[in-house]
Amino acid sequence: MKNFILFFILSTFALTTIYITSTPGSSQVDILFSLEAILISFSLFYLRKTPFSLFQIFHLFFFIFFCIAPIAQFHHGTIMWKRTNIFTLSDYTIAILYIILIIVIFNISYIISYKIIKIKQSTEHKFSKLSTKHEFILISVSLISFFIVLAWNDFNYFSVLFRGGVFATKINIESTSLVLIIRFFIRPIGIFLFLLAKQRGVKHNISLFVLGFIAIITAPPTGMPRFAAACLYLPIVLTFFPFFQRKNRIVILLLFGLLFIFPLLNNFRHFSGNQNISIFANFDTMFLSGDFDAFQNFMYVVKYNIITFGHQLAGVLLFWVPRSIWPSKPIGSGFYIADLLNLQFNNISMPFFGEAYINFGFLGLIIFASTIGYTLAYVDKYYTNNYKKNNLFNIFYFVLFGLLFYMQRGDLINSFSYLCSFSLLYFIFSRLINKFTITREFAS
């Protein structure tokens, strides 16, 4: 009954938005948006019975960025990064049909994969809490990461605290690889150690407090990209407030973060001392802003049939190769189409399925939808089968919620870099903490 109520509310909200904003001659597009809204709402609340999953995160992104936002943009005549309206009803029709096809293929791939995938359950181990010595080691590692980040910011903590603006100062590091290591790997260390220590348990609560304090001052949410902040701080909320792990509350939490927290953090992208901080978003124009350009950027790629035959994907998979070694290394796909189409702004996102099309065309949509369906089914099933036996994986699973949202919005080269670095952090420190805490009877 609760699922039906949520399905009804979400569908009604989307259909009401379409009805209120509808204009003459747009009935075909409105019908397709309506079908998409119903399909997504049904998928969110009926196809998965678990309290939360990556499956739900996938569909929540589509509901906001590929349904509600483009509805508002379509009926307001908003065009991202161009002065004139270049999109026709046919462009919208084709793009929505592609989106509906993606959802259907993803759902089929996920459901079939979830049923046939066999997950080996983790070996049962008995762990103790972290000892005083091990707490000291984790605090020391966190402090080292903090001072590295502080040194990178020329020992100006305001530069750490604020993402950009008058306070931002960085020392000149010629090696871009070193900058990437600091940004993607060193800076998040404290938060990973804090969360893993909380999950495993500490002997002294003061140690957990110190770890948390160091983690937050090293990677404050105001000092990093908003989606990166979501990847790191959403697990903190879910770990310390299990209330949000109950059925469908993760959807409400993410909607709250997207509608309220993200606009607040936007104040610190180019912060100045005399700047007025806007606490609440302007909901009249929120979905018309560049933050919600995913659908139109997807349309750009489809309309102009931009296909690179895997060239952009090579840049993603080999993001760690320095440009000094590979001078023709691809730039982000958002930058690429902005330059190619002479858009007004070049630092734009490219959604995951825009990356699919820009690499392999229509076939890429099928390949990417099938692949991500299988991948998310595997991870969801692994979590469901092992969350009690391998409780440290719970932390990484929560990190993936934000990462999936980030990856779907794009661009892929940055989100994939975060995925690789966060995966490595989890692998290294979860194994370290397991080694610290496994009891002797199981270690022998």
Image (cartoon, rainbow, N blue to C red):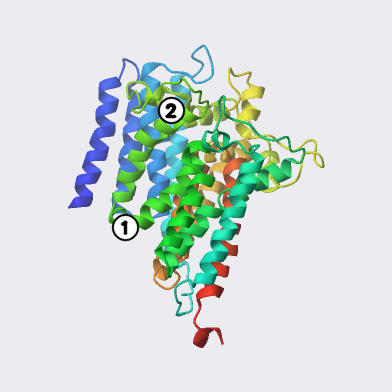
* Residue 206: quadrant of the picture: bottom left
Q: CA distance from mark 2 to mark 1?
A: 42 Å
Q: Residue at x 44, y 33 (%)?
A: 265
Q: Mark 1 sits on what residue?
A: 242
Which residue type carries mark 2? Thr
Residue 312: give x, y in percent of width and height: 67, 39
User: Which of the marked residues, 2 or 1, is nearer the chain's N terminus?
Assistant: 2
Image vertical order of residue 402 relative to residue 83, above or below: below
**In the shown orientation, is residue 274 left or right of residue 68?**
right
- Residue tagged 2: 93
- Given the image, on which type of amino acid does mark 1 rest? Pro
Q: Is residue 146 above or below residue 69?
A: below
Q: Position of residue 112 (x, y in %)?
A: 43, 60
Q: Residue at x 63, y 29 (%)?
A: 335
Regarding mark 2 in the picture, which secondary structure is present there? Answer: helix
Secondary element under disc 1, as helix, strand or loop, is: helix
